[in-house]
Amino acid sequence: MYSLFSMFQTCMFALQPFLGSEDSVNQISGKIKLGKEVLATLEGNWDSEVFINDKKTELSETFWNPTTEIKQRRLTRCTVHYDEQGEFESERLWQQVTKAINNKDQTEATQEKFVLEEAQRKAAKERKAKGEEWLCHLFEQDPITGEWHYKFADTRPWDPLNDLVQFESDGAIQTKVRHRTPMVRSGSVISLSNQGAKREKCNYQ
């Protein structure tokens, strides 16, 4: 998020992991910067309490603590049924590793992880031998920085008058809207006609 005088904020949100304690669910962390200087940091859980820490004074205070009313308005989390997942979906691909970890069998977990890694190496060798180029469906690499970025990111501001809900279809995050032309315009909106065509093919729930 950007504002005046080169002040900006970066935030990272985390969903519920397959494994981990209750404290690791729905975590958020972030930084508020002025240029390169970090003025404050944010940390906590976005569905409970988030704290802001002033880097200069080292004081910490509550930044966000949702009321019961706000929590009741939380959107229902939708997940893809196991039988409908593709072979490379994380939950399905790592099921044997997850099962071994839940059974506290570190040896079995390591072995199952090795099996997955060997399959990945084998597939890479076969593509190289055939002269095939590996194409990433959901991410693209920045040729300058080498960083990978999500192809379907929509960074425009949320428009409460026009936007209804965001949803995922085949890995692509899209927005169901009341009107095709958004009320809030932004340079990050790419190919509105293509986005509209995609929405028509999706079943909304």
Image (cartoon, rainbow, N blue to C red):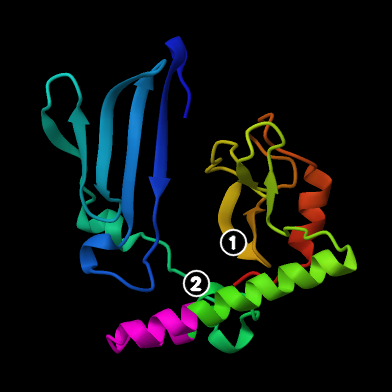
- The residue pinned by badge 2 equals 78
Mark 1 belongs to which amino acid?
Phe
Q: Residue at x 40, y 39 (%)?
A: 11
Residue span colored magenta = 96-113
The image shows residue 194 at horizontal and vertical percentages of 82, 50
Q: Is the magenta stretch mostly helix, strand or loop?
A: helix
Crowding at dot 1, Cα within 10 Å, few <14 / some 14-19 / many 20+, comes out as some
The image shows residue 2 at horizontal and vertical percentages of 48, 24
Q: SS class of the residue under badge 2?
A: loop
Q: Can residue 94 be seen in this view?
A: no
Residue 64 horizontal side relative to residue 61, left or right: right
Q: SS class of the residue under badge 1?
A: strand
Quadrant of the snapshot with the C terminus: bottom right
Crowding at dot 2, Cα within 10 Å, few <14 / some 14-19 / many 20+, comes out as few
Is residue 191 found inside the magenta-colored segment of the image? no
Q: Which mark is residue 124?
A: none
Residue located farthest toward the top when viewing the structure as drawn: 5
Assess whether mark 1 and mark 2 are in contact (beta carbons under 8 angstroms).
yes
The image quarter containing residue 25 is: bottom left
Q: How far is the residue under mark 2 from the one under mark 1? A: 9 Å
Q: Which residue is drawn at 62% across and 45% down?
A: 149
Q: Residue at x 76, y 51 (%)?
A: 195
Front-most of residues 102 and 133: 133
The image shows residue 169 at horizontal and vertical percentages of 66, 66
- The residue pinned by badge 1 equals 167
Front-most of residues 154 and 32: 32
Mark 2 belongs to which amino acid?
Cys
Residue 60 horizontal side relative to residue 14, left or right: left
Q: Can residue 136 be seen in this view?
A: yes
Is residue 102 found inside the magenta-colored segment of the image? yes
- Tell which circle, 2 or 1, labels the residue nearer the N-terminal end: 2
